[in-house]
Image (cartoon, helix red, strand yellow):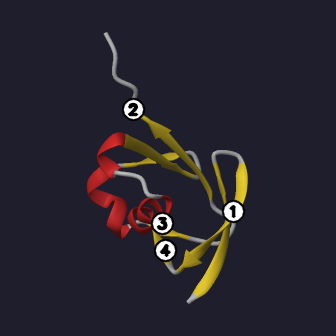
Amino acid sequence: MTELTVTINGERRRVPGPATAQSLLEHLGLDPRGVVVELNEEIVRRPQLGDTAIDDGDRIEVVHFVGGG
């Protein structure tokens, strides 16, 4: 297993690699049903999370849904 250095929500972090958007969310303890993932300024659709590779140097934004009314 290798480590990747990525930027998540503006913070540089090391994460286990190889990684997909899905495995990154699992590593972060996040439920994919409650977040939106943006990878290098492109939104990753939920069905593609497991097929979307994360590479060293990528920029990831994870946005949480907030309920209310």
Badge 3 crowding class, 10 Å Cα cut-off, few under 14, some 14 to 19, many 20 or more, is few
Label 1 secondary element: strand
10 vs 47, nearest the viewer:
10
Asked if residue 22 is positioned above or below residue 17 in the image, the reply reads above
The CA distance from mark 2 to mark 1 is 23 Å
The CA distance from mark 3 to mark 1 is 12 Å
Per the image, the residue denoted by label 4 is 19
- Residue type highlighted by circle 3: His
Which labelled disc corresponds to residue 13? 1
- View extreme (left): residue: 47
- View extreme (bottom): residue: 1
Residue 49: % across, % down: 35, 60
- Residue type highlighted by circle 1: Arg
Per the image, the residue denoted by label 3 is 27
Residue 3: name its quadrant: bottom right
Is there a contact, CB below 8 Å, between mark 3 and mark 4? yes
Residue 60: % across, % down: 58, 52
The CA distance from mark 4 to mark 2 is 23 Å
Is there a contact, CB below 8 Å, between mark 3 and mark 1? no
Badge 1 crowding class, 10 Å Cα cut-off, few under 14, some 14 to 19, many 20 or more, is few
For the N terminus, the image quarter is bottom right
Label 3 secondary element: helix
The CA distance from mark 3 to mark 4 is 10 Å
**In the image: residue 55, left or right of residue 46:** right
